[in-house]
Image (cartoon, rainbow, N blue to C red):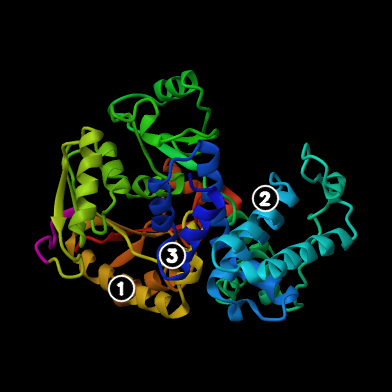
Amino acid sequence: MEKPRQLAFIALRSVHQGAYADVALDGVLRQAELSNADRRLVTELVYGSVRRMRSLDAVIDQLAKKKAHQQPPDLRTILHLGLYQLRYLSQIPVSAAVHSTVQLAKENGFSGLTGFVNGLLRQYIRLARDVDAQAASRRVGRGARGEGENSELVDFSKDPLQLPEDPVERLGILHSYPNWIVEVWLEQLGTETEQLCEWLNQPPAIDLRVNTLRTSIETVEAAMQSAGVSVDRLPHLPQALRLTSSTGPIQNLPGFSEGWWTVQDSSAQLVSHLLNPQPGEVVIDACAAPGGKTTHIAELMEDKGTVWACDRAASRLRKLKENAERLQLQSTQLCVGDSRTLSQFKNTADRVLVDAPCSGLGTLHRHADARWRQTPKSVQELAILQQELLEQTSTWVKFGGVLVYSTCTLHPQENEAVIQAFLARHPSWQICPPTLDSPASAFATSAGWVKVWPHRHSMDGFFMVRLSKENH
């Protein structure tokens, strides 16, 4: 049976060769027979090491003669795994973290460098001990036999990592983000930036959206509680429940196969409420897959009317179709194609949703590697795509109709700037703030758009705005 740390190493090696973290992790978990605890450990080690890559590299840079990027790639990955356990996982005894990392080096072609690995990790532990620590200490290796080290206290509450003075560099290294992302947030948030950085390094919550055409929120709550799963309701969101205990596979939870609920983050639920579709209308979701918002729109319309789900990827629309069938929704229609070029919808829609492809800076906690994949250049390219989508989809709206533009990013270039440029080109369109009875109104800004900040609202970061087309 493969050991969890070896599996984590194999997945991380794939990530460093260009694979997506979730795909690489899924690949190793599928092939291994693991206990739930070991699956959780592999997941934590893979996502954590990817997320904290810049901080872990900075520790290597500080302690080793060769910088992190000069180390053999596999050795760097092994050091990341050891340092991640020491630095971020209080439940793993220090001796176990060191021993298992030395073993990894031995088993993966670095027998001659086990002394280096052992030395670097112990140097980090010594530094942590030397830092004058006043916060809570943790006992090392409780219950392990015979090693003198195991009875000592190691305190990682004060940081042995030396940080630069420059505020952008300091936040970037300490919380492991590229400088450009920190800069984008500092401009908008100032001193709150650190809270946002910390929040997006926490594991994501799982929210459910109750399908009120099939059941009630009370019924789902009761079913979860009798299955030993605890849930909380969320303020402002009439259909949302947040899972607050570990659950095992989602599809095994009560009500899944009956179509009682679907997984959707609470801030994504706000988008369809802002759109406010009505029974009998024609509504188009321009970038629909994987379909969370499409199915929500159908539910809000009581499954009466037509919801067109458009997307370039036929395979992702198939997933949407499966989900709509499980939720027993009849009103969704699929349309494969690029919404920038679809002309058949001109002046046909009462409402259009453009949930645009974006850099995803509001969901970095869900996508461990996204912070390293996006760049200022990719943001620029996305902003052009977003403008093109708005240009075309705005022609689909009937006079007097509504268009909602949304993203899960926190970059003004993809949000406010896109909308301001669109309105400057199209004087017949205007911002239409959420009405007071809308769940979205609690998050509205003075400019009329809605912005969800994760560290303030405990939800994914989102931007959304409702635009209306005046009658002529």
Q: Earlier in the sequence, mark 1 or mark 2?
A: 2
**Residue placed under numbered mark 3 in the picture:** 14
309 shown above or below 131? above
User: Which secondary structure, mark 2?
Assistant: loop
| Residue 234 visible in this rendered orientation of the protein | no
**Residue placed under numbered mark 2 in the picture:** 89
When asked about the image quadrant of residue 280, the answer is top left
Q: Amino acid at mark 3?
A: Ser
**In this rendering, the label closer to the viewer, 3 or 1:** 3
Say the numbered circle drawn on residue 385. 1
Question: Residue at point 78% right, 72% down?
Answer: 162
Q: Amino acid at mark 2?
A: Leu
Asked if marks 2 and 3 touch (Cβ < 8 Å), the reply is no
Circle 3: is it few (<14), some (14-19), or many (20+) Cα within 10 Å?
some
Q: Quadrant of the C terminus?
A: bottom left
**In this rendering, the label closer to the viewer, 1 or 2:** 2
Give how far apart the Cα atoms at labels 1 and 2 are: 41 Å
Give how far apart the Cα atoms at labels 2 and 3 are: 23 Å
The span shown in magenta is: 343-351
Asked if marks 3 and 1 touch (Cβ < 8 Å), the reply is no
